[in-house]
Image (spheres, helix red, strand yellow):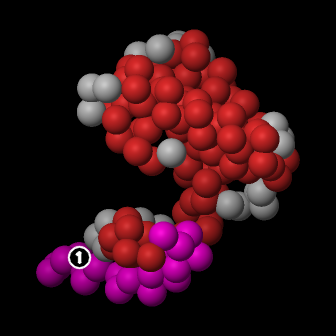
């Protein structure tokens, strides 16, 4: 599925969408229409459509995935919080400001609660995630990242 997103974001939108849709159909056969796997495919399609400027489709897919994630995953799961940001971004671009800001605030507050306040080491989790693919390990790295040193003269 990552291949489909990569294709779509590098100028091969139709091919990327076909790839993700094909994976989504296999997920439905294997795990069902209401699985986290199917929702993740919808989230990827939503991201690709958002980046392509197809906001109505992006909203529909992102909202479907967000609803499924909220039903399936724990409320503080990073995937749900990240998708809330994606949906919020889409809603902002559609002019649905109030709903977007509510989602974005909730997502940010939950991420800060789960991961701690952002530090200068905020890029460390991405590198860790690429290295081992583990959300749990990403959280551990985030929490154990050293806080930035105070600037001279700051109190």
Q: Nearer the viewer, residue 88 or 138?
A: 138
| Residue depicted at x 45% and y 86% | 144
Q: Position of residue 42 (x, y in %)?
A: 63, 34
| Residue depicted at x 58% and y 17% | 57
Q: Position of residue 89 (x, y in %)?
A: 49, 30
The residues colored magenta run: 133-155
Snapshot quadrant of residue 14: top left
* Residue 104 as seen in the image, left or right of residue 15: right
- Confirm whether residue 147 shows in the render: yes
Looking at the rendered structure, the number of numbered marks drawn on it comes to: 1
**Residue 142 higher or lower than 30, as above or below:** below
Instruction: Look at the image and tell me in which quarter the C terminus lies.
Output: bottom left
Callout 1 crowding tier (Cα within 10 Å): few <14, some 14–19, many ≥20: few
Snapshot quadrant of residue 118: bottom left
Q: Magenta span has 146? A: yes
Q: Residue furthest left?
A: 152
Q: Which residue is mark 1?
A: 154
Q: Position of residue 37 (x, y in %)?
A: 69, 49
* Residue 29 as seen in the image, left or right of residue 149: right
Regarding mark 1 in the picture, which secondary structure is present there?
loop
Q: Magenta span has 125? A: no
**Residue 130 higher or lower than 88, as above or below:** below
Q: Position of residue 26 (x, y in %)?
A: 68, 41
* Residue 29 as seen in the image, left or right of residue 102: right
Snapshot quadrant of residue 23: top right
- Confirm whether residue 84 shows in the render: no
**Residue 133 higher or lower than 88, as above or below:** below
Q: Nearer the viewer, residue 12 or 81?
A: 12
| Residue depicted at x 58% and y 30% | 21
């Amino acid at each position: 599925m990552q291949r489909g997103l990569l294709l779509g974001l590098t100028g091969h939108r139709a091919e990327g969408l076909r790839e993700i849709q094909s994976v989504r159909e296999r997920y439905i056969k294997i795990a069902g229409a209401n699985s986290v796997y199917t929702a993740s495919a919808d989230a990827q399609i939503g991201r690709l459509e958002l980046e392509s400027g197809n906001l109505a489709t992006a909203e529909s897919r992102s909202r479907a995935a967000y609803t499924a994630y909220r039903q399936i995953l724990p409320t503080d799961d990073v995937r749900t919080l990240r998708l809330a940001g994606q949906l919020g971004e889409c809603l902002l671009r559609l002019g649905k400001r109030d709903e977007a800001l509510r989602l974005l605030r909730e997502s940010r507050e939950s991420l800060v609660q789960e991961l701690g306040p952002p530090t200068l080491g905020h890029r460390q989790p991405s590198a860790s995630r690429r290295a081992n693919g583990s959300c749990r390990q990403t959280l551990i790295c985030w929490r154990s990242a050293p806080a930035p040193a105070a600037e001279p003269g700051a109190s």
